[in-house]
Image: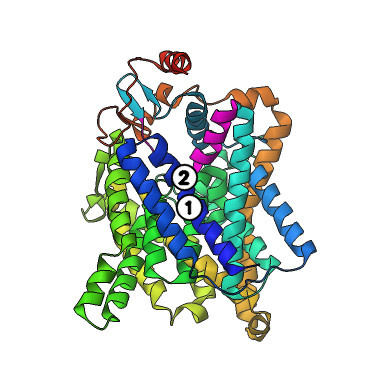
Amino acid sequence: MSRKLLYSFAIFYLALPTVIFLLTWTNLFIGIPLALGIVGVLLSLCKNFKGYTPIGSPLVVFSICIVIALWITLAGVGGFLWQNNWDHDFRNALFIDLVKYPWPVTQGNEMLIYYLGYWLPAAGLAKLCGSLTLGWILQSIWAWLGIMTALWLIFDYIGKIKFSVIILLIFVGSIDIIPALIRNVDDMQSGIIPFIDAVIENWGGIGFIEWPDVLIFWVYNQFIPSFLGCMLIFKCNDARITIFTMAMLLLTAPFSEVLLAVIAIRQLIVLVASQRNASQRLRVVFSSVNILAILLLVVIGSYITSNHASGNIHLNMTLLAPGPEQMFYWKLFFSLLLFCIIPWIMLTLKNLYRDSLFYLLFLAYIPCMFIQMGEAHDFLSRSVLPLLFFLFLKLSQTVADTKEVKKRSILWKSAFTICIVLSAVTPILGFTRCIYNSVSTPPDEWRRHGFVSIFKTEFAHDNFTGDREGWIFSRTYHSKATSLTEDIELYQQER
């Protein structure tokens, strides 16, 4: 496969939601120039890729395609099988609103404000065709394309097609079963068959760290773009691509930007320092990519921060204040590190200890432990994604080198096997939970659970909405309607 084709599609995949957003949600006098700027930068970046990437035999490629499609389906993406309650309830309501109502989606004095980029391509096509069913199908296809592209970037990084990487993607993650058993999670025995309906990944309560094996079941909309973007950044190691990718992730996975910003700053400093004179340094600093990224940060950043919940960002000073709560939080965070990150650091240490990027990401993540948004610790679990994806990349590189694996000690092989087996419990329970509920619950019943609209949710309403007039770059058209029903009726009349 042409490397130019692979990397061009990866950049296109990340850029398309932002372009759609600019042309349909923002003031066109702002959206059109920025969308054209994205297209221009995208074309200039795609010129730099040369050579070929491994593609593998047709049988291997076909097997990988089928396995990833099954993984996505069993995780509930697209709604073809039972979906985990709660997270999917909100995301389904958001997607339905995007398909059914005019953009930007509003109700009365409120607007839908969320990092909704992942859904825009599927929702846009479904809206044009007037079919919500098509929207669910397109959502699954979009997820499949994103994961497959990220996987081929990994294959290009390690220089070969290895099915073991797929096994790692599906089964490697946090070792949840041990702390879940220790804490005696309430729903461990729920369902007719013990453990069949257990959700052991929530053992941390308000705090959690999730790998791809769990992210796909709950927050696929953030996981897939962030996963692809991080693999693109790690493989290219180019300041221009890093900054452009970060700009595209603003609308899909903004929490990942924290650690990625550290990478971008380092790459930019190195690039500026390598220039011969001040004129060249200024050209690097004020390049078209950087200017475009700053403009997008202003436009999309102001959109995201118009969300009602965005004002509730603060330092969790409980970690520093003496008392029982302080001990609880420190025990929680050390437990998260012990069961979610440290085992995989130890197993990949040989490939990590000389890589400065690992230390940079790990040190940059420490302050994130003190940042809290709202009542839960979503920031803690989402900001860590670049670090987890980097560990996954290094783990894939380690396992792909079969000669090196054979040379490893029996202790390392035993530890690796134990960690894989223990971490695999969580995704296996996810699969059994999906299959069990899909079979035992009538489809009409589990498909009806959720919310009719994201505006009709009582809990977490502020997480998805903001003031209608709070975003100054919104489209000039403002409906006079006061409800979603009136909005769509007025929209149909105007058409």
Which residue is depicted at the point 43% across and 79% down?
355
Q: Is residue 42 above or below residue 156?
A: above
Examine the rendering and report whether any part of residue 176 can be seen.
Answer: no
Residue identified by numbered label 2: 17
Q: Which residue is mark 1?
A: 14
> In x, y percent, where is residue 207?
40, 49
Q: Main secondary structure of the magenta part?
A: helix
Reply above or below: 481 against 345: above
What residue occupies the far bottom of the structure in this picture?
Answer: 407
Percent coordinates x, y for residue 333 in the rendering: 38, 57
* Relative to 89, 408 lies left or right: right
Name the residue nearer the viewer: 189 or 144: 144
Residue 6 in the image: x percent, y percent? 58, 63
Is-magenta flag for residue 129?
Answer: yes
327 displayed left or right of 204: left
Residue drawn at point x = 40 percent, y = 73 percent: 357
Q: Amino acid at mark 2?
A: Pro
Name the amino acid type tagged 1. Answer: Leu
Q: Which residues are magenta?
A: 112-130
Residue 364 lies within the magenta run: no
Residue nearest the observer in this picture, 451 or 317: 451
Residue 439, x across and y down, in percent: 73, 32
Residue drawn 41% across and 17% down? 487
Dot 1: what SS?
helix
Camera-side residue: 317 or 192?
A: 317
Say which element carries label 2. Answer: helix
